[in-house]
């Protein structure tokens, strides 16, 4: 763990620990670590028998934990899912419908609930919910319930900004997109291929301090990997193609997260009282990753755009029957994580907010398969009707899943598509014409849902 320890020493220069005045014994409540990768497509792990990718650390987590294969992102691009996994509400209610929308300060977050219950709370990694790139007028991450934060160019406060080396003889270039000129927190320039190690190292330092202080902790570890641009270490560049560079970044991230996982596994005070949840914010970027047999990619409402891998690990919190199991029947989404993790922690949610998320903690802990009782709905980001540069055609405006049925249509109810995911997980056979009554029913449900949401 030498590289991991080095990251911790560097980050000590810019992290200022808060004074924790909420004395709660760490033994009373579990630690929760939510790891959210960026643009990691469904199927982009070794345990899916990927022909190229090697992800031994994610594979080991899945083998000693639980895989849930019917987990969905809240949206097909980054920010909507990130808002939903903080607020427990759909991105249409939070107003974060795409990139460039800040999370409203009045939103009640899971971090605030944990903080009130005596948890030490930290956010380490990408934010993308306001105050990013060249936008300096936004709340700091610590204003949303986090005692400490360390982010990249997609947020404010202490930041690690990337130094990109293509290992081709050209000068190393800075990747800041204007963030370095904003102030609002100290900046350290960091090898882009090591950013995940930096965030993981800061998270580990935070966990160790919380444990020493007798506090449970809630931590977000949100790497910028595997979002483009792709700058893996030289040994992971392969033939230099977009796909190989993406794989190189993902494999590097696997190793860097693995050091955090190893630290937790080997800690007598953390191993049996820590729950790690690992997912992605949306599907893969077209031309880089893949979604196996699933149709679509990032920005689309097909399965490949909104399905996400999900691993849950917690040997002291999960029954032996959950270890190494794959739950391929529990259907739920990112906003369900908020009430579920609060339930696992024994923490009450806010009284003045009605979650869209449902408590599916039994599924998370492997006790039994549990799906949402209400349908899942998605709305296309308003700025992503199509993505010609990536070869993606015009998208449908809405999608929903109810039971095994996946239904898509436009704002006016036209261009209807219906798929039975039990028989057609790749969404290749549109059977809307064969089920007119069902299509009428689902169209009415989807448009009624839309009327309840914020208007575009």
Image: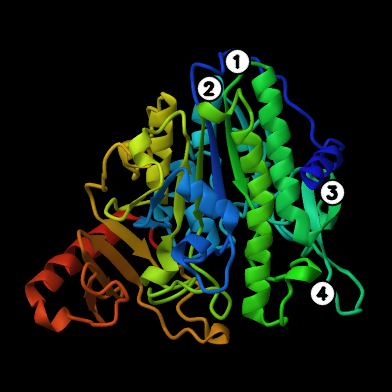
Distance (Cα) linking label 2 and label 1: 8 Å
Indicate which disc, 4 or 1, sits on the residue closer to the N terminus: 1
Indicate which disc, 4 or 2, sits on the residue closer to the N terminus: 2
Q: How many neighbours does mark 2 have within 10 angstroms: few (below 14), some (14-19), or many (20 or more)?
A: few
Instruction: State the residue at coordinates (42%, 76%).
Output: 296
Indicate which disc, 3 or 4, sits on the residue closer to the N terminus: 4
Distance (Cα) linking label 4 and label 2: 45 Å
Distance (Cα) linking label 3 and label 2: 29 Å
Q: Which residue is mark 3?
A: 187
Indicate which disc, 3 or 2, sits on the residue closer to the N terminus: 2
Mark 3 lies on a secondary structure that is strand
Instruction: Tell which tag, 4 or 1, sits nearer the viewer.
Output: 4
Check residue 166 in the rendering and tell me which mark sits there, or answer none: 4
Instruction: Tell which tag, 3 or 4, sits nearer the viewer.
Output: 4
Distance (Cα) linking label 3 and label 1: 30 Å
Q: Which residue is mark 2?
A: 116
Query: In the image, residue 60 lies at what x, y percent?
Result: 53, 49
Q: How many neighbours does mark 3 have within 10 angstroms: few (below 14), some (14-19), or many (20 or more)?
A: many
Q: Dividing the picture into quarters, in which one does residue 171 lie?
A: bottom right
Query: In the image, residue 370 lies at what x, y percent?
Result: 26, 44
Instruction: State the residue at coordinates (24%, 70%).
Output: 407
Indicate which disc, 3 or 1, sits on the residue closer to the N terminus: 1
Mark 1 lies on a secondary structure that is loop
Query: In the image, residue 393 lies at what x, y percent?
Result: 44, 86
- Check the image and report above or below for 356 versus 293: above
Q: Please state which of residues 315 and 74 is positioned toward the viewer in this rendering.
A: 315
Mark 2 lies on a secondary structure that is helix
- Check the image and report above or below for 275 versus 312: above
Q: Which residue is mark 1?
A: 22
Q: Please state which of residues 204 and 451 is positioned toward the viewer in this rendering.
A: 204
């Amino acid at each position: 763990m030498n590289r991991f320890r080095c990251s911790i020493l560097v980050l000590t220069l810019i992290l200022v620990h808060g004074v924790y005045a909420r004395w709660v014994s760490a033994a009373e409540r579990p630690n929760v670590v939510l790891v959210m990768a960026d643009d990691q497509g469904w199927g982009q792990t070794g345990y899916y028998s990927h022909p190229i990718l090697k992800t031994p650390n994610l594979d080991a987590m899945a083998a000693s934990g639980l895989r849930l294969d019917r987990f969905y992102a809240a949206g097909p691009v980054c920010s909507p899912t990130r808002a939903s996994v903080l607020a427990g509400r759909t991105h249409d209610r939070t107003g974060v419908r795409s990139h460039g929308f800040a999370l409203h300060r009045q939103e009640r977050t899971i971090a605030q609930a944990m903080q009130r219950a005596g948890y030490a709370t930290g956010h380490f990694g990408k934010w993308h919910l306001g105050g990013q790139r060249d936008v300096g007028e936004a709340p700091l991450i610590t204003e949303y319930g986090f005692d400490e934060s360390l982010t990249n160019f997609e947020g404010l406060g202490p930041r690690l900004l990337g130094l990109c080396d293509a290992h081709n003889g050209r000068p190393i270039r800075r990747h800041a997109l204007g963030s370095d000129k904003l102030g609002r927190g100290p900046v350290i320039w960091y090898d882009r291929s090591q950013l995940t190690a930096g965030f993981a190292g800061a998270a580990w330092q935070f966990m160790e301090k919380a444990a020493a202080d007798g506090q449970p902790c809630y931590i977000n570890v949100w790497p910028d990997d595997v979002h483009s641009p792709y700058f893996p270490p030289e040994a992971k560049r392969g033939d230099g193609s977009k796909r190989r560079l993406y794989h190189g970044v993902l494999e590097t991230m696997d190793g860097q997260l693995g050091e955090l996982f190893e630290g937790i596994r080997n800690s007598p005070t953390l191993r049996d009282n820590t729950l790690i949840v690992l997912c992605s914010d949306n599907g893969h970027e077209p031309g880089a990753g893949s979604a196996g047999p699933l149709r679509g990619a990032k920005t689309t409402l097909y399965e490949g755009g909104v399905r996400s891998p999900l691993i849950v690990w917690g040997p002291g919190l999960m029954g032996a029957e959950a270890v190494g199991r794959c739950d391929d029947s529990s259907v739920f989404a990112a906003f369900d994580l908020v009430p579920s993790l609060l339930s696992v922690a024994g923490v009450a949610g806010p009284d003045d907010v009605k979650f869209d998320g449902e408590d599916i903690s039994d599924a998370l802990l492997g006790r039994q398969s549990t799906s949402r009782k209400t349908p899942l709905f998605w709305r296309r980001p308003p700025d992503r009707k199509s993505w010609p540069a990536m070869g993606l055609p015009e998208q449908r405006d809405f999608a929903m899943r109810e039971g095994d049925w996946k239904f898509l249509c436009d704002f006016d109810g036209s261009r209807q598509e219906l798929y039975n995911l039990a028989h057609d997980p790749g969404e290749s056979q549109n059977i809307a014409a064969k089920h007119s009554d069902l299509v009428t029913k689902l169209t009415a449900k989807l448009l009624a849902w839309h009327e309840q949401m914020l208007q575009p």
